[in-house]
C-alpha cells in the first residue's frame, strides 16, 4: 500500500486543520494486506486512519475483536476530514 505523495500531503494538511497538527501521525509505510492498494493502481489517492479509541466509552478493542466498539463522536471528525480533503483536492494542482 503506497499512498500518492500529493494526495498524502493534501490529507495531512486537511487532518491538521481538523484535529490539530499534534494529533496527526504520518506513517511512511503501513504493512498488512489492504485491498485499497488495488484502487491506487488505477487512480491516485491516499489511505488514512481515523482513530476511534476512547477508554471512557469502552471503545478500546481492536477493529477485528468481537468486543470492538467505536466512539461515535469520531464519525463527525471522519466526515469533516473527507469533506475537507475533497474540497482541497478539487482546488489543488492535482
Image (tube, rainbow, N blue to C red):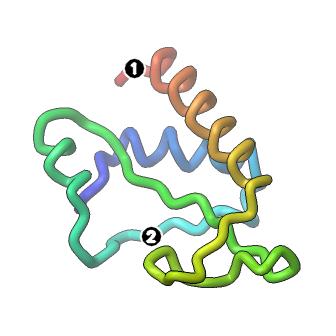
Q: Give residue 19's position: percent from left, percent from top.
A: 76, 52
| Residues at marks 2 and 1 touching, judged by CB atoms closer than 8 Å | no
Q: Mark 2 points at which residue?
A: 27
Q: Which of marks 2 and 1 is in front?
A: 2
Label 2 secondary element: loop
Quadrant location of the C terminus? top left
Disc 1 packing (10 Å; few <14; some 14–19; many ≥20) = few
Q: Which residue is drawn at 68% across and 82% down?
A: 60
Which of the 4 quarters of the picture holds residue 13? top right
* Residue appearing at x 68%, y 36% in the figure: 80
Q: Where is residue 77 in the image (x, y as percent from the top left)?
A: 72, 46
Q: In this view, does 40 lie to the left or right of 57?
A: left
66 and 11: which is toward the camera:
66
Q: Of the two numbered discs 2 and 1 on the same chain, state the one appearing first in sequence.
A: 2
The residue carrying mark 1 is: 93
Question: Residue reaching furthest top?
Answer: 91
Can you tell which quarter of the image residue 84 is in?
Answer: top right
> Which residue is found at the position 51% from the left and 15% from the top?
91
Front-most of residues 42 and 16? 42
Q: Name the residue located 39 percent from the left edge and 52 percent from the top edge.
A: 47
- Side (left or right) of 54 relative to 52: right
Q: Residue 73, percent across and down?
A: 79, 53
x and y percent of residue 27 in the render?
45, 70
Q: Distance between the residues labelled 2 and 1?
A: 24 Å
Quadrant of the frame with the N terminus: bottom left
Q: Nearer the viewer, residue 65 or 6?
A: 65
Q: What element carries label 1?
A: loop
Amino acid at each position: 500500500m503506497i499512498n500518492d505523495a500529493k494526495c498524502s500531503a493534501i490529507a495531512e494538511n486537511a487532518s491538521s486543520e481538523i484535529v490539530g497538527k499534534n494529533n496527526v501521525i504520518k506513517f511512511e509505510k503501513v504493512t498488512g494486506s489492504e485491498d485499497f492498494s488495488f484502487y491506487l493502481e488505477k487512480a491516485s489517492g491516499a489511505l488514512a486512519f481515523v482513530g476511534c479509541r476512547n477508554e471512557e466509552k469502552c471503545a478500546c478493542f481492536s477493529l477485528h475483536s468481537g468486543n470492538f466498539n467505536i466512539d461515535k463522536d469520531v464519525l463527525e471528525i471522519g466526515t469533516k476530514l473527507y469533506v475537507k480533503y475533497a474540497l482541497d483536492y478539487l482546488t489543488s494542482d492535482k
